[in-house]
Amino acid sequence: MTLLSKEQIQNLQKLFLEKKYLELEFEIEAISSFNDRSAFLANLLGVSKLRNKSSQKKDFIDAKNLFLDAYTKDPNFIDALCNYALVSIKLKNFSQAREELIKKKNVGYNKKINETLAKIYHFEGNIHHQIELLKEIDKYDQLNIN
């Protein structure tokens, strides 16, 4: 795994906050390769590919692979899993993402998991399951459990 210096982390944060996504992509690719990239860097690279104004279908496919890589490297990285699922919806190929979300949901409640799974159910037209998830979110929100 690529270890980052404090300066590298600050530079990546600065580029992200300034919305310089193309520069951020180049920086991440310069300091790491696909195989040694940390889950954090893979996820960040995927996000920057999607936020770049000139994003095309290839960028969505690349981002999907990066999010899956991040989640595979760190199965507790819920943001990477949800990013993977959301871009999978856009690409209309989300069955694997749905299955991973269901596995995580069966482990315990997570608002982000429920929201993302509800979006998949909505896209599928499975409104009954979507409503169940949204009711569960509402219940836990009232209890202030996230």
Image (cartoon, grey):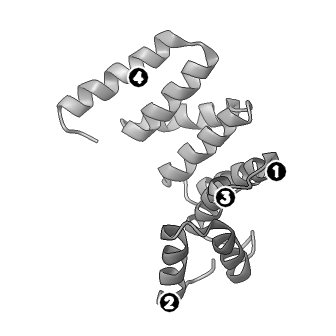
* Residue under label 3: 52
Mark with earlier residue (1, 4): 1
Mark with earlier residue (3, 2): 2
Secondary structure under the numbered disc 3 in the rendered image: loop
Q: Between tags 1 and 4, which lies in front? A: 1
Secondary structure under the numbered disc 4 in the rendered image: helix
Residue 100 versus residue 43 in the image, above or below = above
* Residue under label 2: 7
* Residue under label 4: 133
- Amino acid at the residue labelled 1: Lys
Secondary structure under the numbered disc 1 in the rendered image: helix
Name the one closer to the observer, 2 or 53.
53
* Residue under label 1: 58
- Amino acid at the residue labelled 2: Glu
Q: Write the residue at 47% across / 82% down.
A: 10
Do residues under tags 4 and 3 come within 8 Å of each other at their CB atoms? no
Left or right side of 134 for 81: right
Q: In the picture, which quadrant includes the C terminus?
A: top left
Residue 37, image x, y percentages: 66, 72
Mark with earlier residue (1, 3): 3
Q: Between tags 1 and 3, which lies in front? A: 3
Q: Write the residue at 75% across / 69% down.
A: 34
